[in-house]
Image (cartoon, rainbow, N blue to C red):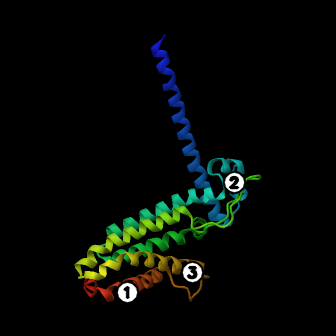
Amino acid sequence: MNNASASAAPAAGDGRSARWDRHRADRRRELIRAARQAVHALGPGASMEEIAAAAGTSKPVFYRYFGDKAGLQRAVGEVVIGKMQARLQEAAAMARSPHEGLRAMVSAYLQMAETSPNVYAFVTRAAPAEAPAGSAVTAGGTEPEALSHFVSAITRMMENAIHAQLQAAGGGPRLRALHYWPPAAIGMVRAAGELWLASPDGPDKPSREEMTEQLTGWLFSGIAEQFPGVRMLS
């Protein structure tokens, strides 16, 4: 038996498999990019057929890579929210105080959402799956998985960023309740931010900078009242 020939066959097969995996990964990224552009132009309610047409391909191609519309929503969300999370982490890392860190994170969040409200809505709204003919469709649904992971990560980031400063300011027993504050803060920023995004442009609508300052003030004032020493760090 030719051992060299026998060992070469699996190696060649492994090479073809690796190339095919890379091809699929590249194609998936292309489809996600095309879907983002389609949603940006068409709106968050764009159908799979409309998204596929805008991407220059067919619905079956999208179903093959993402399963259904919910799968596409999740894939786009992972990319968009991953970039948003990186921006927030960068903003927090460059901040010189808790107050500056909060302002930077609020500003980064509003800026990313404002850049493409359609894409933001597409990845943050739970929607029924839009599946190919003959397959089951699950109505309703919960918050998109990518967004849930994003909120959890940002919650931990905010808690870690401010914990040391509050402790240095004499937090004492009140630090036990600290972990309740980041999710409450994120909930407020998200709710107010989405309402602001949906508001029509006009003289009564605050600018992004004004909205950033307002939200930061609401968030930080509540903490500063319980931890007066933090005021010196703002």
At 59% from the left and 45% from the top, the residue drawn is 27
Residue 20 location (% of width, % of height): 56, 36
Find the distance from the CA under tag 2 to the CA under tag 3. Answer: 30 Å
Find the distance from the CA under tag 3 to the CA under tag 1. Answer: 22 Å
At 58% from the left and 48% from the top, the residue drawn is 28
Q: Please name the amino acid that badge 1 sits on.
A: Gly
**Residue 95 vs residue 18: left or right?**
left
Residue 184 location (% of width, % of height): 44, 78
Q: Which mark is residue 52?
A: 2
Discs 2, 3 touching: Cβ within 8 Å: no
Is any atom of residue 66 visible in this view? yes
Nearer to me, 76 or 36: 76
Q: Please name the amino acid that badge 3 sits on.
A: Leu
At 50% from the left and 25% from the top, the residue drawn is 10
Vertical position of residue 68 compared to residue 189: above or below: above
Vertical position of residue 21 compared to residue 53: above or below: above
Q: Please name the amino acid that badge 2 sits on.
A: Ala
Q: Circle 1 is placed at which residue position?
A: 222
The residue furthest top is: 1
Q: Which mark is residue 144?
A: none
Q: Circle 3 is placed at which residue position?
A: 195
Dot placed on the residue nearer the N-terminal end, 2 or 3: 2
Dot placed on the residue nearer the N-terminal end, 3 or 1: 3
Neighbor class of circle 2 (other Cα within 10 Å; few <14, some 14-19, many 20+) is many
Residue 103 location (% of width, % of height): 39, 77
Neighbor class of circle 3 (other Cα within 10 Å; few <14, some 14-19, many 20+) is few
**Residue 19 vs residue 230: left or right?**
right
